Amino acid sequence: MTDRRTAPRRHGRTRQITPRTHWLLLSVLAVTLSTALLLQGYTHHMFGITPDDAAGARGSSAAVPARVSHGGPVIANAAGAVHTARPETRTIALTFDDGPDPVWTPRILDVLRRNHVEATFFVVGTEVVDHPELVRRIVAEGHQIGIHTFTHADLSRLAPWQRTLELRETQLAVAGAAGVTTALLRPPYSSRNDALDDAGWSVLKQADAAGYVTVLSTQDAEDWQRPGTGRIVANATPHGHAGQILLMHDGGGDRSQTVAALNTLIPRLKARGFRFTTAGAAVGMAGPVQSAGLGDHLQGMALIAALRTGDRSVWLLGVLMYAAGAISVLRAVVVVVAARRHRRQRTGHRARSWGPPVTEPVSVIVPAYNESAGIEAAVRSLLASDHPVEIIVVDDGSTDGTADLVESLRLPGVRVIRQENAGKPAALNTGLAAASCELVVMVDGDTVFDTDTVDAIVQPFADPRVGAVSGNAKVVNRGGLLGRWQHIEYVVGFNLDRRLFDLAECMPTVPGAVGAFRRRALLDLGGVSDVTLAEDTDLTMALCRDGWRVVYEEGAVAWTEAPASLNALWRQRYRWCYGTLQAMWKHRGALVQRGAAGKLGRRGLVYLLLFQVLLPLLAPAVDIFAVYGLLFLDPVRIAGLWLAFLLMQLGMGLYAFRLDGERPGPLWSLPLQQFVYRQLMYLVVIQSVFTAVSGSRLRWQRMERYGSLRTPGPSGAGAAGATGPGPETDGAVPRPEPYAAVPPPRPVPHDPYPTAPDSGPHASAPGSGPYLAARGPGAHASAPGSGSYVTSLDPGPYMPAPGPGPYMPAPGPGPFAPASGSGPNTPPAGSARYAGAPDRGPHMPAPGSPPYAGAPGPGGPYVPASGPGRYAAAPPPVPHAPAPDPWPYPRPEPYVPQPEPRSHPVPPPPAPPHDTTRWY
């Protein structure tokens, strides 16, 4: 049966604007974040401040000029005619390394201010970035600034380009923090002139070429060892009246002893006639610290901003990473506990019953657009259901002959409705209007059902509170790596979540591949809305907000094709995610509602927002941070955390596979899923969020079909080796094709009525209703106990059933001889029981059936039936549900033996009443 309907045209749904600038923006953000993290990792974790004796043993000093080894601590023009300088007599130049420190530098500055002393601070670039305000205070109070590298790295162990980077970045940091530049340099781990080796001398020459003057020391207070205040004072006290450049520290650890020592040392040395000044002034340098140019100042400010942003990003990412890990662990525990409880409620010894079995017929709606690759397998699997169904295929303007293919199958109980292309929601609404049953199952055209799927999915409707039921969708084409990953996602992700949603009474989605609904509930909502691209999610949320309960039936298994390429997967998930965001926004009012709507809002929507939107949006940053941790943090700890997370996912996968009765073999690909599939999924979320925020509209992203669904084949007890439906071959072990449920034609056909005047046959069994007319010359096998013939799948004549019925074929055109055995016999010659008897009649009708039509000659009392029927006065045909197995059954056909011939025709009894308004 085919209807042609015109659906309303969609407006505003086909415009497709794909924003491209967001990918540029995302790339810029990712590069910026990566650069900031790399710089932050280099500056904070590659080197760092260590004690001054950590540089190791001194090397050869053959290349160091004697005038340097025995000269003054201030070394200039190292790359040319080197000269050195010493402080004047009774002059102390206090120098402080490794700062600025937020605790100890201010205290030291306070001591210096109280004693009216100026000093020189050799600052570390990373500390300048962290505490630029202290650098500004140092300069403002009249002290000098010197460079102590950016990361406190041993310059003698670095490549020349790294030395340049260390010096340049520190200079920029000082310029950005205080607006000055300095020519003073003290290499880390340096001390006196006589400790300078060849490697250190090469550093001084490169620094001189960059414009720096190196300031070593003549006396070390050794406060970095924290030997005690008295010892520090003793180490810092000059022996004699020679001028000294005194090495102390204001950073790098606890400097409380240094502060205490200064309070004693400065007054004591002043009392001995020493004066305190800066390193430059001590040797008569003219202006080693100058105002920075505008370019250096701006670059320095940008450097400080970038590094401080990197610091904050690392801190934030660390917090988010641990928070995400904690939430993920909590989610894993919750979904596993919920799945266990859900399983016990449904299958345990205390399992709850939905109520009395639901046996009423079901309307199955199959919206189809260019589904020729899989529509036959889908429809045949539905027709093989062990629950009474009517099947309505709504062709939404297909261009590949989908509707023609279904019609050519000539399957009983299958209607085809054609409409102009209007979208899946319109196709579903068309099918909903044409449905004659209260219970409606919606199934995609690329999905096939098990024989018990329909019966299983409608059982929860015994509870009058249930308005919709979600089935268990499984991936059929799971042979490749991408198929395995999707198979894992369906079993572990979707199905575990649905069990949780079922218990929490906040189911957000009944999948379009396998879902059942109450028709009146959908009509109360106005049908399926086309406002969003995820019409299944939108519809399910609307049902929840309307007060209906939506449940999950894991036993209702359907097999669906999954995308077989990354491009196809992207398009499908893009539509899913974008449509889900639309549905969440549309139903955001549920957050403040009460009852069932409030459960959806405060449980379901919050769950979706957290785990399907926010966490995927943060996933790229988390991945970048993981790489950062492997490079700059403890790689063993980072790898251990990743392994622990992977083991947790594997545990969830094993349990989920066990619940679904699946083999755990595909889980070997779970680690690989973290490096390709996961990234693709969070990029889909990012694309969807940007599309939604930008206000762009997205058209339907139809998936390519591959024809991996199989036409029904042998199964059951009589099919050797058949084990039931299942996915494609997975690995080395062959698995049965899905829905091999209908047997092939049986040999040696027979036609018990060889002389019928038309292609019929049409007969009526007593009390059972008329036989369904075949669409063509196909064979008709008897249904057990119903007396109805149903259309078989192959051409050929009728197949006789064993036992006392039906009539056996006669060897010729008649008259017919009595048949041997207990079955009904043909009438003797002269009775003209069969059409084509040698005389004119009269022709006896069979008891309980209409008289025969088409008897030869004008003398017969019965006129031919109008139309294609074989018997006159037969009631109109009523379709009957197909038998699960169309071959003969041990039960006898509902025929009565032929009575003895009578001399007068017997009037036919009235035809039994039949309900022709519903498909069975």
Image (spheres, grey):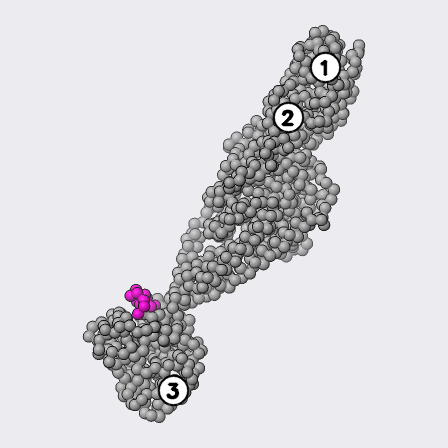
Q: Secondary structure at mark 2?
A: strand
**Which residue is disc 2 drawn over?**
791
Would you identify the image quadrant in which residue 402 lies? top right
Describe residue 541's horizontal placement relative to residue 276 as left or right.
Answer: right
State the residue position of label 3.
233
The first of marks 2 and 3 along the sequence is: 3
Q: Secondary structure at mark 1?
A: loop
Residue segment shown in magenta: 156-169
Q: What is the quadrant of residue 778 in the picture?
A: top right
Q: Residue at x 55, y 61 (%)?
A: 326
Query: What's the amino acid at mark 1?
Result: Ala
Residue type, mark 2 in image: Thr
The reply, left or right, for residue 614 in relation to residue 65 is right
Question: Magenta segment: does it hold 65?
Answer: no
CA separation in Å, label 2 and label 3: 109 Å
State which tag comes first along the sequence, 2 or 1: 2
Against 315, residue 568 (above or below) is above
Q: Mark 3 or 1 closer to N-term?
A: 3
- Mark 1: give few (<14), some (14-19) or many (20+) Cα within 10 Å: some
